[in-house]
Amino acid sequence: MPNAQETTDRLLETGSIRDRAELLFSNQHKRVCKELDKLFSILLLLEYAAGIMIACCSAYSWNGSVAHVNPHLYLAIGGGLAIISLPILFTIYFRGSLVTRVSISIAQIVMTALLIDLTGGRIETHFLVFGSLAFLSFYREWKLVLLASVITAIDHSVRGAIAPQTIYGIIQPSLFRTFEHFGWVCFGDFFFIRWCIQSQKEMQFLALQQAVIENAYDDVEDQVKLRTAQVVESEERFRTLCSCAPVAIFEADVHGAMTFVSGRWTDLTGQEYSDALGFGWLKHIHPKDRRRLKEQWDLSVLEGKDFVEEFTILDESGTERVAQITASNSADGPRIRMIGTVNDVTEQKQSEANVKQLALARQREEFLATLSHDLKNPLIGANRVLSLLSDGILGPVANEQKKLLVQLQASNNSLLGLIQNLIAAYRYGTTGTALQMETVNLQTLVAQCVEELDPLASHKQIKIVTDFEESDVQISADPSAIARVLRNLLDNAVKFTPSQGQVQVSTTTSRDGAQVSVRNSGSYIDPEKQNLLFRRFWQGQDGKRYVAGTGLGLYICKSIVESHRGTIECASDKQSGTNFTLTIPRTREFESLSL
């Protein structure tokens, strides 16, 4: 494993890191030196005060009975002040600078020598030398320790030779004592200087580590900024793609709440983006689908399964549209659980419905062709043969045979009417049959239909009474279609009117158009059944009792009348019977009408 020095040298090969590490080391070392300068200034003041106190203990010297002020007191006050003044001034004005550290180093070791002198060279005060060197090593500059050691060696050498009593407390000079003390100082310097060098390297290594961390942080920050910009760009690109997509795109969290919806959802529903977030999108789901869709959605989110459903959307105006939602479980992280699309399939459903309608129309046409070819045409041919036989054209027939032929022909006509009703019902239920519109005299058309049904009524001893309000009421209509309606109403009236009864046919005019009323005196229809009369294949019990039918007659009548922009209504009471009223607009322009 590489040591601190090898790691430091390897990292220092990078210029920017090296420069930053040197700056960090310099700033840190300067902060340490400033703090130490302040502490040493306080220490010098304390040593100065201690020196004065020591000097005061022997402030006077006696010569017999005469007392003299001890020179140590002057030395402690004046000399001590001279020693500490300069470093304290440097600390105040130049704290942290090299000159301040040098002056403090010199002052500290000189102040230690002064205290040794004031104590008469006691051995205990010599430990202040080692304490001073230890304190000076806190600067982590071995040169300051070496400077203080050199000054100590000079002090011990000079004073040990000239005034040994001031430093060793003895009268005679002792070279051994000098070398002994100097040896102990060198012994301490070995550790102090080594610690300074090692501590300085550690500070440099720490500064280098911080520089590397800062550089890595800068790199990471640059990468984060780059990735953030890329994410923002990607998100913008995603939102742009979402806004251009023909489907609505959404994201949902682990609870199924929407965290993002594209602008296509707003186009579909008119709902604002902020309102659609969470579960606000459910407001535009049709009530008939909302509960089912919510339950299925919650289940898919809980189980993490894919989700595909069709539902109906209600936009702000209330318009319904069919949509299909498709969502899948997302593995992009814990924040997003589901991502999917909402597609408007209204036109697709309409196309499918149109295809089905076309298929049904083809089936109906095939059915109509079958009815016409396989049933209707043979009956018409059979009726012609029966007519020829009954009329004696093909040869004489007996009266009994003639009655049988007439009965057969009547049965064929009844069956032919049923087939014609079926054909008309299926034809009117498809895309429609074009109307041949022309101006028609309503009274003339009604009179013709009454004349056609009069023999049937006379046979049942029923009287048909007409009441025309005006003699010339013109309407725009298809005469054959309206005649079919009138014949059906008259035929029903005759059927449900008992013998000796009466059928009333009247025409009136109003602002809405021309009305034709057909009233019979022999039947009553319950109000709840009146709404069912015009339904396809519906036939009341009374109708079944009188005659077998398909239940299509009134349905066909209503289809024809409504194609003329008219109405047909039924009213019935027990006293006056049942009345059918149809209203047809007066003469107007019909550009394109169809059944």
Image (cartoon, rainbow, N blue to C red):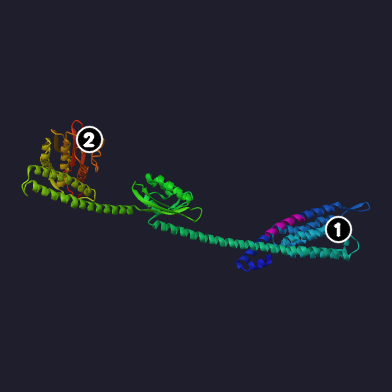
Q: Nearer the viewer, mark 2 or mark 1?
A: 2
Few, some or many C-alpha atoms within 10 Å of disc 1 (few <14, some 14-19, many ≥20)? few
Q: In this view, does 171 lie above or below 350?
A: below
Total number of numbered discs in the rendering: 2
Q: Rounded to the nearest whole Å, what is the CA distance between mark 2 and mark 1?
A: 141 Å
Task: Tell whether 247 sits left or right of 154.
Answer: left
Secondary structure at numbered mark 1: helix
User: Which residue lies at the image location 21% right of the left edge and 39% below the top edge?
Assistant: 544
Q: Observer-nearest residue: 75 or 408? A: 408
Q: Position of residue 308 (x, y in %)?
A: 41, 52
Q: Residue 428 carries which label?
A: none
Q: What element carries label 2?
A: loop
Give the mark, 2 or 1, whose residue is nearer the N terminus: 1
Q: In which quarter of the image is residue 474?
A: top left
Residue 315 is situated, as x and y percent measured from the top left of the image, at 36, 48
Residue bearing the label numbered 2: 525
Q: In this view, does 344 lie above or below 531?
A: below
Circle 1 sits on which residue? 123
Does the magenta stretch mainly form a helix, a strand or a loop? Answer: helix
Give the quarter of the figure containing the N terminus: bottom right
Seen from the viewer's position, the closer of residues 186 and 406 is 406
Looking at the rendering, the stretch of residues picked out in magenta corresponds to 30-44
From this viewpoint, is residue 514 visible? no
Q: Is residue 226 magenta?
A: no
Task: Please rate how many residues cluster around mark 2, counting C-alpha atoms within 10 Å: few if below 14, some from 14 to 19, many from 20.
Answer: some
Q: What residue type is labelled 2?
A: Ile
Q: Give the side of residue 354 with respect to residue 135, left or right.
A: left
Q: Residue furthest right?
A: 64
Where residue 243 appears, x then y in whole percent?
40, 56
Q: Residue 469, located in which quarter of the rendered image? A: top left
